[in-house]
Amino acid sequence: MVMTEPQQVSRDRMSTEQVTVAIVIPTKGRPNDLAETVRSIAAQTRAPHELIIVDQSPASCEDRVRQLTAGCSDLQLKYFWAPEVPGLVQAREKGVQAASSNVIFFIDDDVTLDPDCIHALIERYQELPNVAGICGVDIGGAEVPWWLVLARRAYMLGAFKDERSVMNKRYAQLGAPQSVRLFSGGWMSYRRWVFDKFQFEGKLWGHRWNSSIDFSYRVSARFPLVIDPKVRIWHRRPYGTHTPEEFVRIRVSGTFFFFSRNVKRNFWGWLSFGWVLCAIFIRSVWRGLQTKALPRTLRTFFEELRKGFAYLRHPFPGSY
């Protein structure tokens, strides 16, 4: 791998300084989930340097969080009760601004960390000073049947190529980190200097979950990113609580958004884009049948399709 000048500067700097980790958790209206996540952080064999919580809930649960971390003398807790913060992207940005550590680890409020997660993360950053970011694996993904993992992999081609499901499925058999282009937003980390060069994009009409995909893809175009099978988490709610309409909206709008910003408009670009949309349509039909909401699901799919092609023809500056 050819190292660019910014990478060489980072390598020289990171090889001579201690790796410190700030965990950033955006949360809203899920105090019990948050408490479970914080318990797993307090139980780490190697504590992070900082725990930064940006709570957008109507009521604060700072006292509960402080009780859960009371025995962690090496952990700096920074709790921001900020119901005025409008979304996930803004909450992450606030966490970045508050962090003093040289690695920032974003996790969702429904994620449980393996007891050695932070220890493995720090060791890997120390071993790979040229790497700009490390994503963990979801050990729950090992329970996903192979046919579904391979089906997901089959429809993600070209710029949409995504190895995350395969990595989650095979994490126990893998020893070394794997180079990737896409990170999972709920358990991704970056070196602090990355945010001097890149920003999360919040202009999404469907769901800001997609901003993590866009962000990691843009970073990977200039700097190495890896998924590390030793950095393990368990995503307790892998499918969230989305309605059938939200399920479709998230995927269709995110696909159009990613295509508009990152994929070349050539034959292979359009082909991979169309192939992903076909797969989303099949999944939408299946989700609609499962939830007995097929008419609403299909109506949402075609409405989002219309919005997406309108955006490709005439991009607008406001929220996408």
Image (spheres, grey):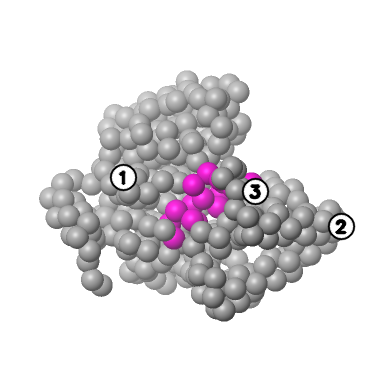
Q: Is residue 22 above or below residue 300?
A: above
Q: Which residue is mark 3?
A: 206
Which amino acid lies under the numbered mark 3 shown in the image of this protein?
Gly
**Relative depth, front residue between 166 and 269:** 269
> What residue is shown with label 2?
295
Asked which secondary structure carries label 3, the reply is loop
Q: CA distance from mark 2 to mark 1?
A: 46 Å
Q: CA distance from mark 3 to mark 1?
A: 27 Å
Q: Is residue 177 shown left or right of residue 56? A: left
The residue at 50%/70% (across/down) is 264
* Pointer 2 or 1: first along the chain: 1
Q: CA distance from mark 2 to mark 3?
A: 19 Å
Asked whether, in this view, residue 319 is left or right of residue 304, the answer is left
Amino acid, disc 1: Asp
**Which residue sits at x=58%, y=56%?**
257
Q: Quadrant of residue 273?
A: bottom right
